[in-house]
Amino acid sequence: MALEMRQQMKMTQQLVMTPQLQQAIKLLQLTRIELQDVVRQELEENPLLEEVADSEETGEDADDSESSESVEMEPEQDSDQDTFHEVDAGDETLRDWDSYLDGYNYSSGEQYSGDEDRPSFESLLTRKGTLIDHLLWQLHMGHFSPDEVHIGEEIIGNIDEGGYLRSSLDEISQVCSVSEDEVLLTLKRIQEFDPNGVGARDLRECLLIQARFLGMQGGVVEQILLSHLKDLETRNYKLISRDLGVDLNQVHIAAKIIGGLDPRPGRVFGSDEVHYISPDIFVSKLGDDYIVMLNEEGLPNLKVSPFYSEVRSNGSVDSRAEEYIGEKIRSALWLIKSIQQRQRTIYKVSKSIVRFQREFFDHGIECLRPLVLRDVADDIGMHESTISRVTTNKYMQTPQGLFELKYFFNSGLATSGGDFVASESVKMRIREIIEKEDHLKPYSDQKIAEMLAGETVNIARRTVTKYRELLRIGSSSERKRHF
């Protein structure tokens, strides 16, 4: 069969992702904080994009305000001076006290005429102390020789955020050019630092340090930690009692004491910062209706600079400049249009969620109904992928609390009455059942499934196990308490 090359015309349809369409999709799934960063960057890069100021003070108003302040300040200064001269000359104590206060308020020796001359508040903030800083402070305040300080600094530098030493004695001895015995002696002294248990090389050593600090050397607690830590994890108290030759009640008391020790002593100095969530939508109840409002705080109002538009229309620029201005105008207009479309889409999706989940907003999580993306997509006439992008990392402030938009979308379980109940409602009910159970005889997953069946929720045991694990709740054997 001979091969030949020839031209052929064929009409096909395909979706082309233009840069503008990619930008619109990207803006749709950004959080409000990320959108602010994108707008700020675009304002810096596009000279034709400007922010609309809500109100601007004129120079004359500012001058008038300054003059009025100066006029109002003069009588106060005169009154202060008169008050100062009226003080009895023999009363030196009051003058000394005033001088002391003046010196105290300006201890740095710097004088500021107004608030605008003072340093910013951020420059006065201090950095949160870390575990390493706390340990180094104790090291330098203790009675250590220069060589011990050098070894101690190397040891502390290898302690992680949990308070555990992550380097071997051999590695530290090689870095410091000393013997392992010297490193061990310094480590033992550092393990006496606050917080108790810091500098340990494993969990057993960490708990032993804390137990010995409480004066439990040679007792049942120390014996369990030395030889029966695994049995303690599995709650095999009878085996521990038999091997140690002590009463079972003593083992229970020792286990309770060990349970009160901190396996991560360094976490009190954790560097994790609190991340605050700023809601994208506010839902409030007004009468019998719910009002949906977008949170547009921090989002600037954008416009195209009229200056460049006039320059382009006058024809006073060459072809290259005109092409550049035209490109930037199109970019600015598309960004403004994309942001407006994003806000409209979020508003439509939020309104649809409120309509579907009306009972949740009225009564709470127990009334949350099953909902899928297709329901909202059909309701507002959009594609499911668009709904998925809109609900990503978006939060809604409701009368029931703050929830991510994806929270309202969940599968359903059938009830004996033929209705459906949301999976989140079932999870909450499982948590409530476990919280009210007898810790000496916790419910099994099968028992929880039977209890839910008695409440008309048809659920399998394996589904209960799945939901329990998603809630990070242990099994019945792990939840069981012997005392």
Image: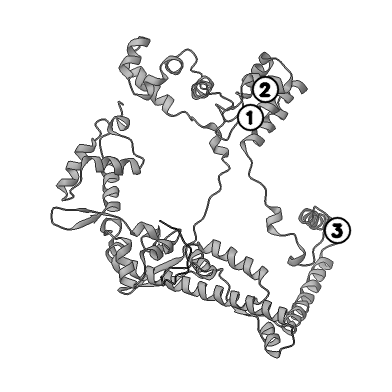
Q: Is residue 404 above or below residue 201?
A: below
Residue 214 falls left or right of residue 63:
left
Q: Residue at x 55, y 61 (%)?
A: 34
Q: Report the front residue among 105 and 324.
A: 324
Residue at the disc numbered 1: 158
Residue at the disc numbered 2: 172
Q: Earlier in the sequence, mark 1 or mark 2?
A: 1
- Callout 3: helix, strand or loop? loop
Q: Are marks 3 and 1 in contact (CB under 8 Å)?
A: no
Q: Residue at x 64, y 79 (%)?
A: 326
Mark 3: amino acid: Gly
Q: Residues within 10 Å of mark 3 (few under 14, many from 20)?
A: few
Residue 199, given in percent of the width and then of the height, sits at 59, 26
Q: Nearer the viewer, mark 3 or mark 2?
A: 2
Q: Residue at x 29, y 42 (%)?
A: 466
Mark 1: amino acid: Asn
Q: Is residue 257 above or below residue 349?
A: above
Q: Report the front residue among 421 and 311.
A: 311
Q: Earlier in the sequence, mark 3 or mark 2?
A: 3
- Callout 2: helix, strand or loop? helix
Q: Is residue 291 above or below residue 249?
A: below
Residue 335, given in percent of the width and then of the height, sits at 56, 73
Q: Can you tell which mark lies on residue 90?
A: 3
Residue 396 falls left or right of residue 116:
left
Q: Residues within 10 Å of mark 2 (few under 14, many from 20)?
A: many
Quadrant housing residue 471: top left
Residue at the farthest front position: 2
